[in-house]
Amino acid sequence: LEVPAGTLPLPAAEQRMDVNRNGFVERSEATGATVDQFWQFDANRDGALSGAEIARGPVGDVYAPSTTFTDRHTVTLGGKRVEMIHLGTAHTPDSTVLYFPDERAVFSADVMQIKRLPGGVAPNVGSWIDAMRTITRLDFDIAATGHALAGRKADALESLRYLEDLSKGVAAGVAAGRSLADIQKSLTLDAYKGFERWDTVREAHIASVYATMTGTR
């Protein structure tokens, strides 16, 4: 959240806004979305945006956390308890599931997706399997997501099975000495054909897992 050190040039779009060519974008020069986000960019509140402030981004109302955790953290509000559980490195290094034990519900914004395949399995499929196993070991009924349908625990388990079947299928192909193209053609994962994005990301998932298992990433 800090403004980058040093003098950075304005990006190309902001250079075009810089009518007086002084290396800054004044409030009167800003156009488009920069007008609406001007004060989010303007870290020092001087009415002019520098290249460093543009690089920092429109995060003027974002504040650093006062409490951090590495495994689990419990928050109690109004007598209700929410457990925050770290999911490892799946999707991002700070992926977390929120567990609401009284409501028997979980919420995961990116890792858990219901009837929908994830856009990618970075950094590797193993991290995604570990994360989904962490989620499905919790005692819940309702599975709430950030980018897909809500569902039940059985749906979350089905998403885990996709990842496991993907991993096992690619591993079997690699062990048999088959090429990536051959595995992509034969590993159809038809059990998940009804999932959103099955027809657009399945082959990319196979390629990602293949690269991990063959050390070609």
Image: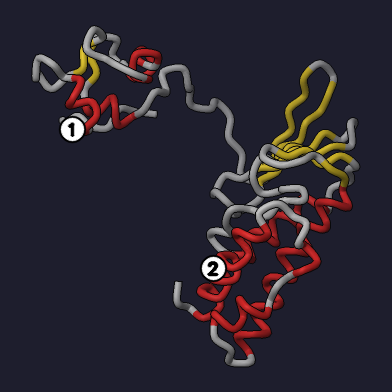
Picture colour scheme? secondary structure
User: What residue do we see at 48% from left, 26% from top?
Assistant: 64
Image quadrant in which you'd find residue 50: top left
> Residue 155 versus residue 68: which sits nearer the camera?
155
Element under label 1? loop
> Residue 69 versus residue 21: which sits nearer the camera?
21
Q: Are marks 2 and 1 in contact (CB under 8 Å)?
A: no
Q: Residues within 10 Å of mark 1 (few under 14, many from 20)?
A: some
User: What residue do we see at 84% from left, 37% from top?
Assistant: 105
Element under label 2? helix
Left or right of 148 on screen, residue 212 = left
x then y, percent, for residue 107: 75, 38
User: What residue do we see at 71% from left, 76% from top?
Assistant: 168
Label 2 sits on residue: 208
Q: Quadrant of the N terminus?
A: top left
As drawn, 204 above or below 66: below
User: What residue do we see at 60% from left, 60% from top?
Assistant: 201
x then y, percent, for residue 125: 62, 65
Label 1 sits on residue: 8
All told, the count of numbered labels is 2
x then y, percent, for residue 86: 66, 46
Identify the amino acid type marked 1.
Leu
As drawn, 52 above or below 114: above
Mark sitting earlier along the chain (2/1)? 1
Left or right of 53 on screen, residue 130 = right
As drawn, 52 above or below 122: above
Q: CA distance from mark 2 to mark 1?
A: 36 Å
Q: Which mark is residue 165?
A: none
Identify the amino acid type marked 2.
Ser
Left or right of 71 on screen, residue 55 = left
